[in-house]
């Protein structure tokens, strides 16, 4: 049992490390998108990023000799690929052309609340009172952000709405991806989700081809950076951690992203959201904290206890299947 506890503790530390890598790289993505978006249109930027990510992930799969995901994983891969890798990236790129990177990160960080809401509906997890209260606080914060940005004109308000839509597609992508990770490895799920997102963005190929020759080397390097690090690496570390922890815990790790984005935006781009925008963002994060505070991880110990369960028929079969899935995700 001591060995099992040690293995579980090590797995938890690796999941936390993977989540931390994801948050830092995703925070940097908001800044890189804001910079590259000055020379690339939203669709072209999404396609360029996904192409770079798909090539990187494909090479890693070849080196590791990863096969195709099991058939049971494909519905989740298809849904997350279209919603998260495809639609989310186009909408977020468009939104960041209308609002600053820090504001975009604050709005998109409503996503964890939406993940809990979709989980309660689709996964039958219920709607705890703290969840509903947190949603009210968070969306009040989003409304404050919208009011603070609306003085800039219709385009700024459009940017707020686009970032909120990005939060919705992000949440739907996470809820879709979680079941896929029960059957496929983190690398498989990420790679084929990225490929599906790339195919979905192919209608923007003409824009990418026409904008690439006129773009500066710095903007193009930002696109490549987005594909290799915040996409190929960060989405894989996210999937790795999501397969080993609950969606709620993973959502909690993203709370630090807006603060990192604001810091990076100030250091790299020289832009910081206004005080009213920051106040609205704090409300967004407070709502997420309220909704998360009352939730307790009930099912977390099961992976450690289950192998020591009874040795009769069905239980060992399930344990063996879960063990093989866990090994495949490593």
Image (tube, rainbow, N blue to C red):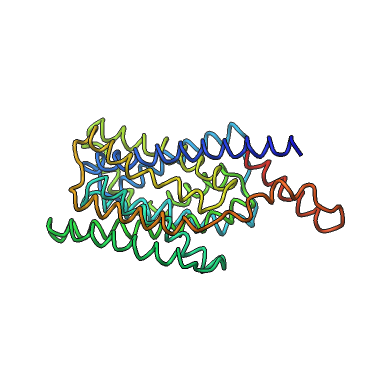
Horizontal side of residue 65 vs 169, given as left or right: right
Q: Is 184 on the left or on the right of 219, as rendered? A: right
Residue situated furthest right in the rendering: 312
105 relative to 74 in the view: left or right: left
Q: Residue 53 at what x, y percent from top left?
A: 44, 40
| Left or right: where 239 falls relative to 138 | right
Determine the image quadrant of residue 111.
bottom left
> Residue placed farthest to the front in the image?
294
Q: Residue at x 27, y 48 (%)?
A: 207
Residue 303 position in % (x across, y down): 69, 48
| Quadrant showing the C terminus | top right
Number of marks in the image?
A: 0
Q: Residue at x 56, y 52 (%)?
A: 246
> How far across and down, in percent of the image, does residue 52 sit?
41, 38
- Nearest the viewer among 128 and 68 is 128
Q: Quadrant of the N terminus?
A: top right
| Residue 149 coordinates in the image, percent (x, y) | 18, 56
* Residue 81 position (above or below residue 13): below
Q: Is residue 31 above or below residue 202?
A: above
Near-viewer residue (129 or 61) = 129
Which residue is rendered at x = 47% and y = 35% of the image? Answer: 56
Tell me: residue 75, above or below residue 267.
below
């Amino acid at each position: 049992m001591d060995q099992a506890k040690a293995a579980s503790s090590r797995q938890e530390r690796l999941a936390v490390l993977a989540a931390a890598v994801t948050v830092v790289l995703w925070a940097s993505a908001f800044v890189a998108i804001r910079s590259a978006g000055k020379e690339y249109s939203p669709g072209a930027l999404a396609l360029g990023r996904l192409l770079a990510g798909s090539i990187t992930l494909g090479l890693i799969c070849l080196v590791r000799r990863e096969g195709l995901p099991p058939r049971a994983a494909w519905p989740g891969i298809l849904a997350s690929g279209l919603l998260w890798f495809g639609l989310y990236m186009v909408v977020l790129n468009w939104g960041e052309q209308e609002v600053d990177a820090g504001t975009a990160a604050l709005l998109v960080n409503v996503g964890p609340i939406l993940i809990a809401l979709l989980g309660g509906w689709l996964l039958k997890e219920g709607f705890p009172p703290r969840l509903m209260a947190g949603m009210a606080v968070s969306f009040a914060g989003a409304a404050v952000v919208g009011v603070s940005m609306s003085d800039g004109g219709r385009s700024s308000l459009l940017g707020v709405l686009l970032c909120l839509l990005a939060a919705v597609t992000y949440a739907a992508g996470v809820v879709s991806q979680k079941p896929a990770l029960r059957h496929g490895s983190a690398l498989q799920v990420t790679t084929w989700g990225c490929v599906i997102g790339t195919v979905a963005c192919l209608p923007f190929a003409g824009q990418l081809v026409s904008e690439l020759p006129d773009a500066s080397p710095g903007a193009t390097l930002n696109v490549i950076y987005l594909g290799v690090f915040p996409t190929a690496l960060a989405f894989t570390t996210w999937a790795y951690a999501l397969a080993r922890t609950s969606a709620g815990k993973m959502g909690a790790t993203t709370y630090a992203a807006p603060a990192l984005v604001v810091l990076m935006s100030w250091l790299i781009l020289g832009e910081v959201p206004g005080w009213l925008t920051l106040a609205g963002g704090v409300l967004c994060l407070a709502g997420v904290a309220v909704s998360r505070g009352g939730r307790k991880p009930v099912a977390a110990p099961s992976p450690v206890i289950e192998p020591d369960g009874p040795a009769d028929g069905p239980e060992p079969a399930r344990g063996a299947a879960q063990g093989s899935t866990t090994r495949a995700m490593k």
